[in-house]
Amino acid sequence: MSFTAKTLQCLECGASFTFSCEEQEFFANKGYTNEPKRCPSCREARRTTRRGTSADPRREMYPAVCADCGKETEVPFQPRQGRPVYCSDCYSKSRTSANR
Protein backbone atom coordinates (compact mmCIF):
# COMPACT_ATOMS: atom_id res chain seq x y z
CA MET A 1 0.00 0.00 0.00
CA SER A 2 1.49 3.36 -0.95
CA PHE A 3 0.86 6.55 0.96
CA THR A 4 1.20 10.19 0.00
CA ALA A 5 1.69 13.05 2.43
CA LYS A 6 -1.49 15.00 3.22
CA THR A 7 -2.01 18.45 4.64
CA LEU A 8 -4.67 18.46 7.35
CA GLN A 9 -6.16 21.20 9.54
CA CYS A 10 -6.03 20.91 13.34
CA LEU A 11 -9.40 20.74 15.09
CA GLU A 12 -8.03 22.57 18.16
CA CYS A 13 -5.83 25.41 16.91
CA GLY A 14 -6.75 25.52 13.20
CA ALA A 15 -3.12 25.23 12.07
CA SER A 16 -2.22 23.17 9.01
CA PHE A 17 0.00 20.14 9.58
CA THR A 18 1.38 17.36 7.42
CA PHE A 19 0.21 13.77 7.88
CA SER A 20 3.38 12.14 6.53
CA CYS A 21 3.68 8.85 4.68
CA GLU A 22 5.49 7.34 7.67
CA GLU A 23 2.71 8.41 10.04
CA GLN A 24 0.07 7.01 7.69
CA GLU A 25 1.90 3.69 7.55
CA PHE A 26 2.16 3.67 11.37
CA PHE A 27 -1.58 4.38 11.69
CA ALA A 28 -2.37 1.58 9.20
CA ASN A 29 -0.15 -0.91 11.05
CA LYS A 30 -1.90 -0.05 14.33
CA GLY A 31 -5.30 -0.59 12.67
CA TYR A 32 -6.36 3.04 13.00
CA THR A 33 -8.94 3.96 10.36
CA ASN A 34 -9.31 7.70 11.04
CA GLU A 35 -6.82 10.43 10.21
CA PRO A 36 -5.54 12.54 13.11
CA LYS A 37 -7.73 15.52 13.90
CA ARG A 38 -5.10 17.44 15.90
CA CYS A 39 -1.60 18.67 15.07
CA PRO A 40 1.30 17.02 16.91
CA SER A 41 1.60 19.80 19.53
CA CYS A 42 -2.15 19.75 20.29
CA ARG A 43 -2.06 15.92 20.49
CA GLU A 44 0.76 16.09 23.05
CA ALA A 45 -1.05 18.76 25.06
CA ARG A 46 -4.21 16.64 25.07
CA ARG A 47 -2.26 13.54 26.19
CA THR A 48 -0.71 15.48 29.05
CA THR A 49 -4.08 16.85 30.13
CA ARG A 50 -5.81 13.46 29.95
CA ARG A 51 -3.08 11.79 32.03
CA GLY A 52 -3.57 14.40 34.70
CA THR A 53 0.16 14.83 35.11
CA SER A 54 1.71 17.97 36.43
CA ALA A 55 4.03 20.10 34.37
CA ASP A 56 7.03 18.54 36.16
CA PRO A 57 6.68 14.72 36.19
CA ARG A 58 10.00 14.12 37.98
CA ARG A 59 9.68 12.21 41.24
CA GLU A 60 11.15 13.40 44.48
CA MET A 61 14.21 11.34 45.39
CA TYR A 62 15.52 10.63 48.89
CA PRO A 63 19.12 9.91 49.94
CA ALA A 64 19.85 6.47 51.36
CA VAL A 65 22.72 4.08 52.06
CA CYS A 66 22.57 0.61 50.52
CA ALA A 67 22.06 -2.06 53.19
CA ASP A 68 24.15 -4.53 51.16
CA CYS A 69 27.20 -2.68 49.81
CA GLY A 70 27.09 0.59 51.81
CA LYS A 71 27.04 2.80 48.70
CA GLU A 72 25.18 6.11 48.88
CA THR A 73 22.17 6.15 46.56
CA GLU A 74 18.83 7.85 45.97
CA VAL A 75 15.44 6.15 46.09
CA PRO A 76 11.95 7.36 45.03
CA PHE A 77 10.44 6.74 48.49
CA GLN A 78 11.08 7.90 52.04
CA PRO A 79 13.28 5.24 53.71
CA ARG A 80 11.94 3.94 57.03
CA GLN A 81 13.90 3.00 60.12
CA GLY A 82 14.52 -0.75 60.35
CA ARG A 83 13.74 -1.40 56.67
CA PRO A 84 16.66 -2.17 54.32
CA VAL A 85 17.21 0.00 51.25
CA TYR A 86 19.30 -1.21 48.32
CA CYS A 87 21.10 0.54 45.47
CA SER A 88 19.93 -0.39 41.99
CA ASP A 89 22.82 -2.87 41.47
CA CYS A 90 22.20 -4.77 44.72
CA TYR A 91 18.44 -4.66 44.21
CA SER A 92 18.85 -6.18 40.73
CA LYS A 93 21.11 -8.93 42.11
CA SER A 94 18.62 -9.79 44.88
CA ARG A 95 15.71 -9.88 42.37
CA THR A 96 17.69 -12.13 40.01
CA SER A 97 18.66 -14.58 42.74
CA ALA A 98 15.08 -14.64 44.12
CA ASN A 99 13.71 -15.63 40.69
CA ARG A 100 15.92 -18.69 40.41
Image: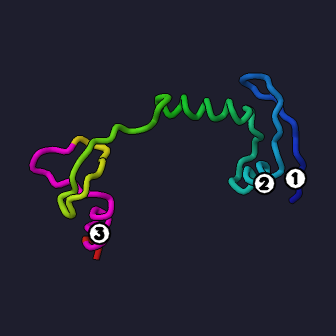
Which residue is the site of mark 2?
Answer: 25
Instruction: Evaluate if marks 2 and 1 touch, with contact meaning CB atoms under 8 Å apart.
Output: yes
Q: Is residue 82 magenta?
A: yes
Q: Is residue 82 left or right of residue 60?
A: left
Q: Secondary structure at mark 2?
A: helix
Which residue is the site of mark 3?
Answer: 93
Residue 39 image position (x, y, % from top left): 74, 33
Question: Which color mode does the image show?
Answer: rainbow
Packing grade of label 2 (10 A; few <14, some 14-19, many >=20) is some
Residue type of the residue flagged with mark 2: Glu
Q: Is residue 30 magenta?
A: no
Q: Is residue 7 left or right of residue 42?
A: right
The disc, 3 or 1, on the residue closer to the chain's N-terminal end is: 1
For the residues labelled 2 and 1, the Cα–Cα distance comes to 7 Å
* Residue range of the region highlighted in magenta in the rendering: 79-97
Residue 5, picture quadrant: top right
Which residue is the site of mark 1?
Answer: 3
